[in-house]
Image (cartoon, rainbow, N blue to C red):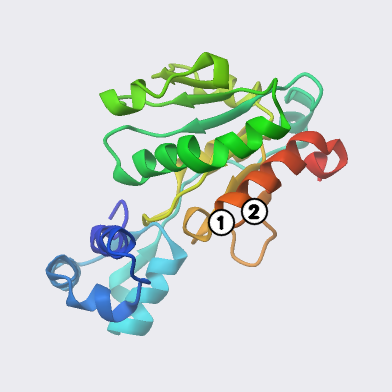
Amino acid sequence: TEDLHSLRQTREKAFKAGLSFTTDLWLQNDITKREIASIYRSDISLIISSFEMKLLTNVIGVDEKLLLHLPFMHNEITQQDIENWPSFKTRHDFICIGNGKHAPNIDAIIWLKKEIWPLIRKALPHANLNIYGAYLPENIKQMHHPKLGFLVQGWNGNKEKVFQNTRVNLAPLRFGAGIKGKLIDAMLAGTPSITTAIGAEGMHANLKWNGTITESAESFAQAAITLYLDEKNWHQ
């Protein structure tokens, strides 16, 4: 599994209907039943998220022998990696990255444009937000507005470089599932992230998040502004 598609779809439907996600809603979804049936028909299923492991074992009662928790496999960040990262002072601007064919990414960009970025830009009038991603739809491309610092850049072939040159990563995900490659990419570049509980889900166990986890547009914007300006906190 790349993620539990039924979880992502149920959360999206609940969000658009103005409902809180519950496991009861998830269990009522026909795709949930199909995914669980697929798991039982398979010798083993690779599960990327620790949250989804718990969902399957605690709620459904799937035997753990049928599941293997297999998140992204990256080498540990070394001291040499850290020393090679650009410094706080040489980095600038914000980044938001995500494939345009993925509904949670499109919703995140729209939320940024309508509610979050205006608050950040008001406090940081010289900062820009660079939006990267393949297959961005026309309605997102039309949001490109240099005078407001909202730059829809599209696909970029060197995500490592753009992350390393950016001071703060923004991932305001309001629905979704699995674990988020964009947040791992930011970690590997030494770039802290502001995200939501959905964004950070299944990724950090009991460890502190490398940035801030928050839910409202106002608190998201304030966390981004604070982190952008506070060098000591940024290094932490």
Give x and y (percent) for residue 159. Answer: 50, 23
Q: Nearer the viewer, residue 147 or 22?
A: 147
Name the residue: 18% across, 77% down: 28
Horizontal placement of 32 versus 73: left or right?
Answer: left
Give the crowd class for mark 2: few <14, some 14-19, many >=20 residues within 10 Å. some
Give x and y (percent) for residue 87. Answer: 79, 25
Q: Nearer the viewer, residue 69 or 24?
A: 24
Element type at mark 1: loop
Residue annotated with mark 2: 219
Amino acid type shown at disc 2: Ser
Residue 5 appears anywhere in the view: yes
Q: Nearer the viewer, residue 77 or 125?
A: 125
Element type at mark 2: helix
Name the residue: 56% across, 29% down: 95
Count of picture labels: 2
Give the crowd class for mark 1: few <14, some 14-19, many >=20 residues within 10 Å. few
Does the CB distance between marks 2 and 1 fall below 8 Å? yes
Please tell me the numbered disc located at residue 216.
1
Q: Image quarter for residue 148?
A: top right
Horizontal placement of 233 versus 63: left or right?
Answer: right
Q: Is residue 146 above or below residue 218?
A: above
Q: Gap between marks 2 and 1, in whole Å?
A: 5 Å
Name the residue: 56% across, 56% down: 216
